[in-house]
Image (cartoon, rainbow, N blue to C red):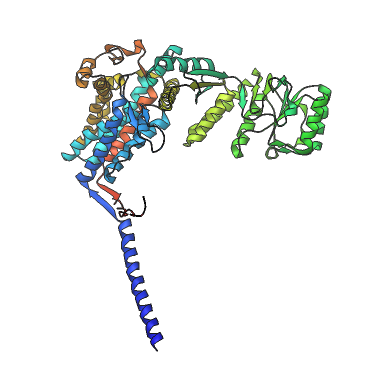
Amino acid sequence: MNHLVLIAAFLAVCCTAFKRNALHYNRRETLLMAKKLSFREESRRKLVEGINVVANAVKITLGPKGRNVVLERSYGAPEIVNDGVTIARDIVLEDPEMNVGAKLVTEVASKSDNKAGDGTTTSTLMTQEIVNQGIRVVAAGANPVSLRNGVIHAASKLAARVKEIAKPVTGNADLLNIATIASNSPSMGAIIAKAYERVGDTGSTVVEESQTLIDEIEFTEGLSIDRGYLSPYFVKDSERQICEMVNPRVLVTDKKIQAVADMIPLLEQLVKSKEPLFIVAEDVTGEALSALVVNKLRGVLDIVAIKAPAFGDRRKAYLQDIAIATGATYVADEVGISLESVTLDMLGRADRVVVGKDTSTIITDSSTKDALVKRIAQIRAEAEATDNKFDKEKATERIAALGGGIARIKVGAATETELKDKKLRYEDALNSVKSALEMGVVPGGGACMLYMSCDADLKAEILAGCNQNDEDEKLGVEIMFRSLPAPMKQIAKNAGLEGEVVADKCRNRPFGFGYNAATDTYEDLLATGVLDPAKVTINALENAASIAALVLTTEVLITEIPKEEPLVKNDPNYV
């Protein structure tokens, strides 16, 4: 009987403890899921504070006399950078509501970086200026939705105006000026201009790290493949460990060649014609590889085989590129062609093929030029249709390989910190040059935006397109025009001058006149080569207006309540 009483008491204690724990667990879950809501003025004020924190950190890098920002790293040395988007992405604020504003302005910088690759600091600064101008008007009682409509309408019209007044790139001197301004270094600008002069519009310029202290540039011509020979017995030049062929025939297939019987009809035809053969296949193994090696060693056939580059769908795309570049028929089941049915007229041709241990280069002739132009246009269209950065990079590589070759800029520096900073500057400058080639150039130093802010006819035209019964929408246009001088003012401020004074001296002057902060002179910036890509200016206007307009129409801000971690007491026994 006593045993039963003890068991019952024990079960009662367990049930009580379980209920207490369950209640505690549910209360903790409720706390974790709780959100903080801010309304009206308070919500907008917190967003603006977050935007201002990021913009103030980023805008000090603007212009030739902009300063650097040091970013702490949890491991390794700190980074010293001058790149707007890199700084913005690194900022996380303690206040969750301010952090939302910080992330919004980071989105502006990232969008500009993805679309044009440069102009991230200008986009951030313009966002701050439009938001701060607009928030005062909203606090005074203006309709935020009408303001948004006015800002978006003005931004689209201003972007169209930039397209109209942009000047096309006329030569290598323009590219040199653009690259020099974007990198803030004449030596970097000269290297980039040299790269573009050599590889042309269709070529590609990539930035790599070097083991030396100086910057160098290397050029690779022809279609380069990151695959080497399948067997060292294919080597013809034992000193350089390469196989070099002149005027070879090219077989391109996505098949895995294992049985020699599949290849016999083709090999017999090649023995008669005495032409060398270059094979690009998914793989060549077993008796097929052995037969090719034996025929090579006996001198019956001059042959070399490599694996197809990349993987999956990208591999098929690369194989089709090689087939088009060499004029070969792509041998695959999906096009209904088997290896046994391949004839000599299905093989492509190349001027020269050089196959090493890890890389192969195909130098093609000019007979497939028209097909290459169409293929490059198709790849460009695919790249524009995707938002994936990796896919865009691979598309650029393919265009370069098919077009004009690859220029590799090898960046050297004394320290790791300097190396990272130089790589970011090179990438910004390369993106600026690409944007300039695409849409032309406008005067730099904020002169283009300042010129438009003084254009009374343009302003009247934009106001005429607004709802004439809505004064707040017209106020949105006014806010956009008042924000345009901000980049020039900030460049002057970073150079140690009063921004408003500099802007006043440049107002109502001919198109192209502005302040050159590098030489501390007022001059025709178009004539002296102080240029900005039109695409960068357009993206700065559109992206800044988009986010700023959304912030102005915010009425409620919902954020997570930060979880407070309980303090864990130090164990006195642990030293």
Asked if residue 571 lies left or right of residue 375, the reply is left
Q: In which quarter of the image is residue 287?
A: top right
Image coords of residue 129 (percent x, y): 25, 31
In the image, 95 versus 568, the foreground residue is: 568
In the image, 165 versus 99, the foreground residue is: 99
In the image, 31 versus 453, the foreground residue is: 31
Q: Can residue 340 be seen in this view?
A: no
Asked if residue 461 lies left or right of residue 309, the reply is left
In the image, 30 versus 443, the foreground residue is: 30
Image coords of residue 531 (percent x, y): 36, 17
Q: Quadrant of residue 440?
A: top left
Q: In which quarter of the image is residue 57?
A: top left
Residue, x 23% and y 40% (percent of image)? 144
Q: Can residue 78 be seen in this view?
A: yes
Residue, x 34% and y 60% (percent of image)? 29
- Numbered marks: total: 0
Image coords of residue 238 (percent x, y): 72, 21
- Which quarter of the figure is the N terminus placed in? bottom left
268 to 192, vertically: above or below: below
> Residue pushed farthest bottom?
1
Residue, x 44% and y 14% (percent of image)? 190
Image coords of residue 37 (percent x, y): 25, 51
